[in-house]
Image (spheres, helix red, strand yellow):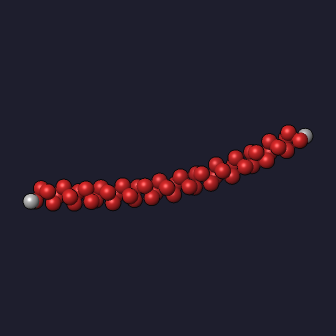
Amino acid sequence: MREEIEEAKKEKSRAYHRAYSKEYRAKNLEKFREYERIKARKYRARKKLQVTT
């Protein structure tokens, strides 16, 4: 009986952390993609400037 309660608590905790981590990863991935877009934009601008000069 006690083990079942302990296991249920652990599973509840795991489920919470899985959900939290999923949300956190999604947010970080979006930030990372935005950063990559900005970097690519700067890189293309720099290349274009080199070609024209």
Residue drawn where x is 69% and y is 48% of the image: 15
Q: Position of residue 2 (x, y in %)?
A: 89, 41
Question: Residue, x 85% and y 39% (percent of image)?
Answer: 3
Question: Which of the image's four quarters has the C terminus?
Answer: bottom left
Question: Which residue is farthest left?
Answer: 53
Q: Is 41 positioned to the left or the right of 49 in the image?
A: right
Compared to 46, does 10 lie above or below?
A: above
Task: Give percent across and percent down for residue 10.
Answer: 76, 45
The percent coordinates of residue 42 (x first, y second) are: 27, 60
Residue at the spot 80% in from the left edge and 42% down from the top edge: 7
Q: Position of residue 21 (x, y in %)?
A: 60, 51
Using residue 10 as the reference point, say whether residue 29 is left or right of it.
left
- Which quadrant of the structure image shows residue 8? top right
Q: How many marks?
A: 0
The quarter in which the N terminus is drawn is top right
Residue positioned most to the right: 1
